[in-house]
Image (cartoon, rainbow, N blue to C red):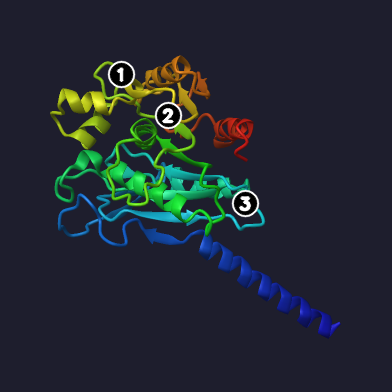
Amino acid sequence: MKTANLIYKALTTVLGLLAVSNLVYAQQHLPLYPQGIPNAKEAENIERNEPNAMVDSLAFDVSEPSIRLFLVPEDRATGTAVIICPGGGYHTLLTKREGSDVARVFNKLGISAIVLHYRLPNDRIMVDPSIGPLQDLQQAIKTVRERATEWHIDPQRVGVMGFSAGGHLAATAGTHYADTYIENPENTNLRPDFLLLINPVISFMDSVGHTGSRANLLGAQPSDKQLFYFSNELHVDSLTPPTFLVHSGADEVVSVENSLYFYRGLRQHHVEAAMHIYAKGEHGFLTAPSFDEWFGRCTYWMGQLGLK
């Protein structure tokens, strides 16, 4: 009996160490640009994280972009990967509620997740703040595809999920993927294979757009050219990735028209898409609908596309 107990304890220890090893690997944190950040000015890194009662934690003044990997082991991996863009109005990042928490749930489904810690627009740290977040997402897509074999990912099943302003960033990558803002000598495909847009900012037009996100990305007096370029509903075409949208009709922060306009463009161009609008629920779904409710609809749609 004593010998059996010793063997059991030894096995338990080994399994525990393996579990910890897998967990550490799954949450590996990598700088996005090991060779130097493009479009950057020399400036002190003053990034800070603050606790928040509603969303757990917030990151401010992000100037050194990175990715946090939540990778599924090869024996459980579906091959699908989702790059997650947290929201925060291009002013902050909800790195836990709209980042690592969601990544862990994807992992349970065999889907690898990559949380993007993208730069927040600021003249202090960027030459052109308007393209900084898009550069970071394009670099993340490029990195995931170029390391797909190593990370047990199918390079043709790399999608982007975005919340609120992160949804705007995701939609920008899905409509402007042909405009390359990073060094890409291998000509790696920068087009997401699918989009998951959660109460997204889509438009920057006065009638429907979120003025806070617009001002943070483009400044107080954006040009007409900038407003047109970053109003993503105006750039949907037949090559826009298949898209899932979810929003609340009661959202008083980002109007539901943002999702409606984007969905209408997808329909007009015969792009496979699904949308669910809830009658009740505030921006960010802080109290309703529940996570399991809206996320279940999201993953059901992914299953219909053979992505899970």
Q: Residues within 10 Å of mark 3 (few under 14, many from 20)?
A: many
Furthest-bottom residue in this view: 3
| Residue 209 x/y as whole percent | 29, 23
Question: Between marks 2 and 3, how big is the CA–CA gap?
Answer: 28 Å
Q: Nearer the viewer, mark 3 or mark 1?
A: 3
State which tag comes first along the sequence, 3 or 1. Answer: 3
Q: Which residue is mark 2?
A: 199
Between 27 and 289, which is closer to the camera in this rendering? 27
| Residue 115 x/y as whole percent | 43, 49
Counting every numbered tag in the picture gives 3
Give me the residue at 46% from left, 23% from top.
248
Left or right, 225 with respect to 193, comes to left
Any mark on residue 208, and which?
Answer: 1
Question: Between marks 1 and 2, how big is the CA–CA gap?
Answer: 13 Å
Between 240 and 64, which is closer to the camera in this rendering? 240
Q: Amino acid at mark 3?
A: Ala
Q: Nearer the viewer, mark 2 or mark 3?
A: 3
Q: Amino acid at mark 2?
A: Asn
| Residue 153 x/y as whole percent | 55, 51
Q: Amino acid at mark 1?
A: Val
Give me the residue at 18% from left, 25% from top.
225
Any mark on residue 4, and which?
Answer: none
Left or right, 44 with respect to 297, comes to left
Question: Between marks 3 and 1, how big is the CA–CA gap?
Answer: 40 Å
Q: Marks 2 and 3: CB-CB under 8 Å?
A: no
State which tag comes first along the sequence, 1 or 2. Answer: 2
